[in-house]
C-alpha cells in the first residue's frame, strides 16, 4: 500500500470545504493508497461536525495538526463569541472588517491563511522524514497550502499533486491585489506552483484551461477532477416531502454570493399573491450576515423565510431530499465562469427540482442538459419571480419535474477517486 500525504487547511471538525478530501481518503485504499493528513489545529467556529473524525479514527487514518497565526483563528481565540450566531466566521465590527480587508489586499500573500505556512512546512517536513510517503497532495482554498507544497517539493523532491478546489488569480472573491505589483507577485506564485507540481487538478474546465495556458507545452499535467456525490451517503436516507412548497438552500453565503435578489423576487411575488404565503416555506441551512437578516425583516417575509444555520453533512442531504425545490446561488462578476459549487452534484443526486440563479460558466454548462432544472440570471429579479411562480403553480398542479439522474454516475465519488489514484500512480512511476 502506497502512502499519500494530504495537506489541507480545511478539514473536520470544520464543515466547509472538507468533503472532497474526505471522500478521497475513504476510497483511495481501494486503489492501493492510504492517506495521512496534515491540517490546521482546530478552533471554535459557528458549527462543527465531529462525525467524520470518528470515522477516520476508526479507519486508523493519521491526522496531524500545525498551528497558524492567521487572523480569523486569532480573533476566535482571543475574542470568542459566547453564543452561536448566524454570522459567518470572520464577521465582526465594520472597523475590524475594514482592517482585515486592508491586510488581505496589502499584506497577506497569497491569502489570509499565510500564517499557517511556516508551521505546516516544518511539520510536513517532519512527517515526510518519519512516514516516507510516496507522494503528497495539497488542496486549496487557501492557496497557502500550495506554497507549503512548493517548499516541501523543493526540499524533498516528493511527487506532488496540486489540487484547486477554487481558482487563484481568477477568483474575484479572494484575489483582490492592492497594486499591480501585488498582482504580478501573486501571478508569479501561481505560475511557480503550476510549473513545479507533477500533477495539477481542478474542479472545473475553466480553471484547468487557465493553467493549461500558463504551462504551454507542459499542459498535459493539468486534469479536471470535478466534485461529486457519494452514493453511500444516500443509502439510509428517505425523502419526507413537506406539505408546504419548501425551497431549501444548504451552503455558505459570502461576499457577493447573496440571496438578496431572490428575497426581493419572493417579496414581490407574495405581495402580488398574498394568499400563497401560507404555502411557502424558505429554509436557509447557512450562516447569513446582518444585511441579509435586515432584508428579510424589511421585506416582511420573516414568516416565510427561516435561517436554520449550518448543520451536519448528512442532515444537509436529508433536508435537500425533503425539499420541494433546491436553490443554487452563484454571483456574476469577473471569472464567475470558473465557479462550480460542490453541492450541485448532491442536488442532482437527490432528484429534487433545482432553481439555479447562476451566470454563464462551468456550472450552467453542467446543469443545462438536465430536465427539472430552471436556470435564471442571478440579478434578474423579474426572471427569478417568474421562475418561482411557475414552479409553485406546477407544484400545486402536481406536475413538477425532477432532474434526470441517468447521466450523473460519472460524478460518483468512488469513480472520481479511481481517476485520482491513476494520476498518483503515474507520477510515482516517473
Image (tube, rainbow, N blue to C red):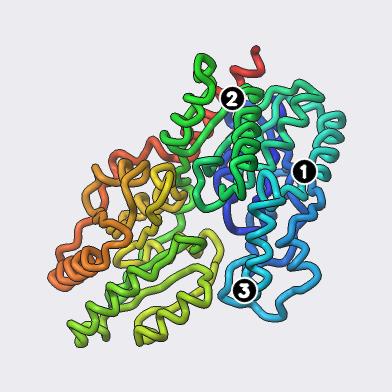
Left/right of residue 187 with respect to residue 390 in the rendered view: right
Residue 81 x, y percent position in the rendering: 71, 77
Instruction: Compare marks 2 and 3 and give the one earlier in the sequence.
Output: 3
Question: Which residue is rendered at x = 77% and y = 50% of the image?
Answer: 115
| Front one among 426 and 108 | 108
Instruction: Compare marks 3 and 1 and give the one earlier in the sequence.
Output: 3
Question: Which residue is rendered at x = 82% and y = 43% of the image?
Answer: 118
Q: Secondary structure at mark 1?
A: helix
Residue 16 visible? The answer is yes
Q: CA distance from mark 3 to mark 1?
A: 28 Å
| Residue 117 tag number | 1
Residue 402 x, y percent position in the rendering: 24, 55
Residue 20 x, y percent position in the rendering: 55, 44
Q: Secondary structure at mark 2?
A: strand
Residue 213 x, y percent position in the rendering: 47, 25
Residue extending furthest toward the left: 397
Residue 55 visible? The answer is no
Left/right of residue 24 with respect to residue 344 in the rendered view: right
Quarter of image, res 98: bottom right
CA neighbours of label 2 inside 10 A, class few (<14), some (14 to 19), many (20+):
many
Camera-nearest label, 1 or 2:
1
Residue linked to disc 3: 94
Residue extending furthest toward the front: 180
Residue linked to disc 2: 199
Q: CA distance from mark 1 to mark 2?
A: 21 Å
Marks 1 and 2 close (CB-CB < 8 Å): no
Instruction: Compare marks 1 and 2 and give the one earlier in the sequence.
Output: 1
CA neighbours of label 3 inside 10 A, class few (<14), some (14 to 19), many (20+):
few
Amino acid at each position: 500500500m502506497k502512502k499519500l500525504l494530504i495537506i489541507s487547511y480545511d478539514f473536520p471538525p470544520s464543515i466547509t470545504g472538507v468533503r472532497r478530501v474526505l471522500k478521497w481518503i475513504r476510497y483511495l485504499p481501494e486503489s492501493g493508497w492510504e492517506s495521512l493528513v496534515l491540517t490546521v489545529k482546530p478552533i471554535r467556529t459557528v458549527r462543527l461536525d465531529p462525525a467524520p473524525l470518528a470515522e477516520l479514527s476508526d479507519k486508523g487514518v493519521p491526522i496531524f495538526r500545525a498551528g497558524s497565526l492567521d487572523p480569523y483563528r486569532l480573533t476566535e481565540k482571543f475574542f470568542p463569541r459566547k453564543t452561536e450566531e448566524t454570522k459567518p466566521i470572520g464577521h465582526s465590527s465594520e472597523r475590524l472588517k475594514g482592517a482585515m480587508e486592508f491586510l488581505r489586499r496589502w499584506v497577506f500573500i497569497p491569502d489570509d491563511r499565510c500564517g499557517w505556512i511556516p508551521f505546516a512546512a516544518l511539520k510536513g517536513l517532519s512527517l515526510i522524514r518519519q512516514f516516507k510517503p510516496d507522494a503528497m497532495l495539497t488542496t486549496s482554498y487557501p492557496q497557502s497550502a500550495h506554497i507549503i507544497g512548493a517548499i516541501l517539493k523543493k526540499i524533498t523532491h516528493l511527487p506532488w499533486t496540486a489540487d484547486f478546489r477554487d481558482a487563484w488569480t481568477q477568483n474575484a472573491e479572494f484575489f483582490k491585489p492592492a497594486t499591480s505589483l501585488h498582482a504580478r507577485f501573486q501571478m508569479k506564485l501561481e505560475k511557480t506552483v503550476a510549473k513545479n507540481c507533477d500533477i495539477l487538478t481542478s474542479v472545473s474546465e475553466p480553471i484547468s484551461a487557465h493553467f493549461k495556458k500558463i504551462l504551454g507545452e507542459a499542459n498535459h499535467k493539468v486534469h479536471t477532477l470535478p466534485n461529486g456525490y457519494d452514493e453511500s451517503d444516500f443509502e439510509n436516507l428517505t425523502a419526507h416531502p413537506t406539505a408546504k412548497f419548501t425551497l431549501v438552500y444548504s451552503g455558505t453565503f459570502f461576499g457577493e454570493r447573496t440571496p438578496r435578489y431572490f428575497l426581493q423576487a419572493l417579496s414581490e411575488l407574495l405581495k402580488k399573491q398574498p394568499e400563497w404565503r401560507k404555502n411557502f416555506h424558505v429554509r436557509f441551512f447557512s450562516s447569513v450576515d446582518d444585511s441579509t437578516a435586515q432584508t428579510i425583516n424589511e421585506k416582511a417575509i420573516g414568516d416565510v423565510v427561516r435561517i436554520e444555520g449550518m448543520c451536519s453533512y448528512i442532515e444537509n442531504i436529508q433536508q435537500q431530499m425533503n425539499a420541494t425545490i433546491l436553490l443554487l446561488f452563484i454571483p456574476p462578476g469577473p471569472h464567475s465562469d470558473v465557479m462550480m459549487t460542490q453541492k450541485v452534484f448532491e442536488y442532482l443526486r437527490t432528484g429534487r427540482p433545482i432553481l439555479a440563479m447562476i451566470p454563464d460558466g462551468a456550472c450552467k454548462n453542467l446543469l443545462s442538459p438536465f430536465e427539472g432544472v430552471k436556470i435564471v440570471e442571478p440579478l434578474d429579479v423579474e426572471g427569478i419571480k417568474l421562475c418561482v411562480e411557475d414552479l409553485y403553480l406546477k407544484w400545486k398542479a402536481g406536475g413538477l419535474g425532477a432532474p434526470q439522474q441517468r447521466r450523473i454516475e460519472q460524478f460518483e465519488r468512488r469513480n472520481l477517486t479511481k481517476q485520482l489514484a491513476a494520476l498518483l500512480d503515474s507520477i510515482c512511476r516517473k
